[in-house]
Amino acid sequence: MKLLTVSQYFESHRGGIEIVAGRLVHELARAGIDVTWLATDATPAPDFAAEPRLRARSLAATNIAERHVGLPYPILAPGSYRCIAREVAQTDVVLIHDALYLTSIAAYAAARWSSKPIVVIQHIGAVPFKNPILRRTMEMANRMVTRPILARADQTVFISESTARQFDGLRYRTRPEVIFNGVDIGTFAPPSGDDEIAAARRHFALPAGSAVALFVGRFVEKKGLAALERLSRARPDVMFAFAGWGVLDPRAWNLRNVRVFDTLAGASLAQLYRASDVLVLPSTGEGFPLVVQEALACGLRVICGMETAGADSGAAPFVTAVPIDPDDPERTAAAFGRALAQCLESPSERGRSMRAAMAASRYSWPRAAARYCELLARLQARAAAALPPVGHAPSLQKRG
């Protein structure tokens, strides 16, 4: 099988969607599929020279929206649309990460024209932007673009239960699937003991005698940075570690109890998880963030919004759900502060091992990849069965 997978960025962008896309292409290639990964050149493409089943192709685009307002929405150059059409014509199945991006829309249109099977993996639903213009634009775009694409795709996959619920009422071509993202359990694992925690804190220059609350993600509005600033000011006794990057840099708060780490990934990020006591994530509109799964795999307590906590009913008993008001960061910070106090008052070594064991059993990349392979094989077989017999002229009618 030849598979074309499409996302807005490559893994070097370090966002959750593209990290998932990167891991998935490796898992599918390991299963024997030839994968081409299309994404914009806003960040460097991966080097697949040593991996014969993997190929990366960059699309010319401008990333001005993210650089200036933190909105990750690259704008394709005109020639990129032709490139997408050529790549679609040469593949067997097209797999698209999130329906709303220009890369996704172009790949969907080209696949429909070429009668290629389409799988859409939908990671997020509506994003409740504070700016009413952005919020209204997002609502209209989901109604006019995302929902029709999800309904007409040959297979829709949601990465969380909460994202699937946001699209209730759609009439799908095929019953949608919920497939949770996997976690690299070999990398994201709990500390072996207090000595490893102490060594990790020394490595990151974090205080040995203070609680450490960790945030991982892009520094943008929907992640709840305004609430975390207020929480950091309200709890000077707690060290707040921020791993990520973005337009809302916590360094600008000038707080003694805030540390920022903007170059961590993989093993180095896992070490910071192990140095921390709790993950705090007051984000909205993003399904089931990968960082929650990584934190649980490392045994951390997790404090997040009620929407995120409900994204996986099986994980709900292992996280602390807090109501989030995107329009009232003071109120959100107060709610997170109460939950943080409760978590720090009752540390539990047994709880850490239970969270890690749950994540290891529930979020398996090989298991997730096996389900995707089944879906892709079924679509490829269905497309092959629909081909006209040899010697018969194909119909000129394209799919709608």
Image: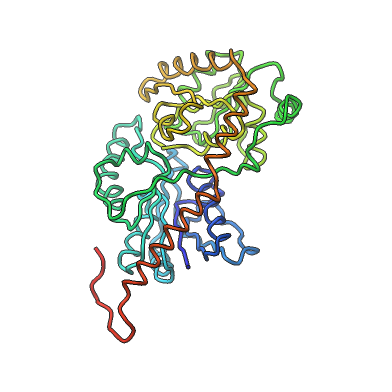
Q: How is the image coloured?
A: rainbow
Percent of width and height locating residue 222: 42, 32
On the image, the x and y values in percent for residue 172 come to 27, 51
Pinpoint residue 244: horizontal percent, then vertical percent.
56, 36
Which residue is located at x 51 percent, y 39 percent?
A: 290
Name the quarter where the C terminus is drawn.
bottom left
As drawn, is 22 to the left or to the right of 191? Answer: left
Outermost bottom residue: 391
Q: Residue at x 41, y 61 (%)?
A: 94
Q: In the rendered image of this protein, does residue 1 appear above or below residue 272? A: below
Location of residue 241 in the rendering, given as x and y in whole percent from the top left corner:
60, 27
Residue situated in front as seen by the camera: 50 or 33: 33
Residue sitting nearer the eye, 249 or 36: 36
Q: Based on the displayed image, in which of its 4 quarters is residue 276 positioned?
A: top right
Q: Relative to residue 196, is residue 8 depicted above or below?
A: below
**In the displayed structure, would residue 90 be above or below residue 142?**
below
Residue at left 28%, top 39%?
139
Judge from the rendering whether residue 223 lies leftward or rightward of residue 53; answer left or right.
left
Q: In the depicted view, which residue is nearer to us: 396 or 184?
A: 184
Q: From the viewer's perspective, is residue 166 above or below residue 175?
A: above
Nearest to the observer: residue 383 or residue 17:
383
Q: Quadrant of residue 297?
A: top right
Task: Count how many numbered circles sit on residues in the image.
Answer: 0
Q: Residue at x 37, y 36 (%)?
A: 162
Side (left or right) of 39 relative to 124: right
Q: Quadrant of residue 207?
A: top right
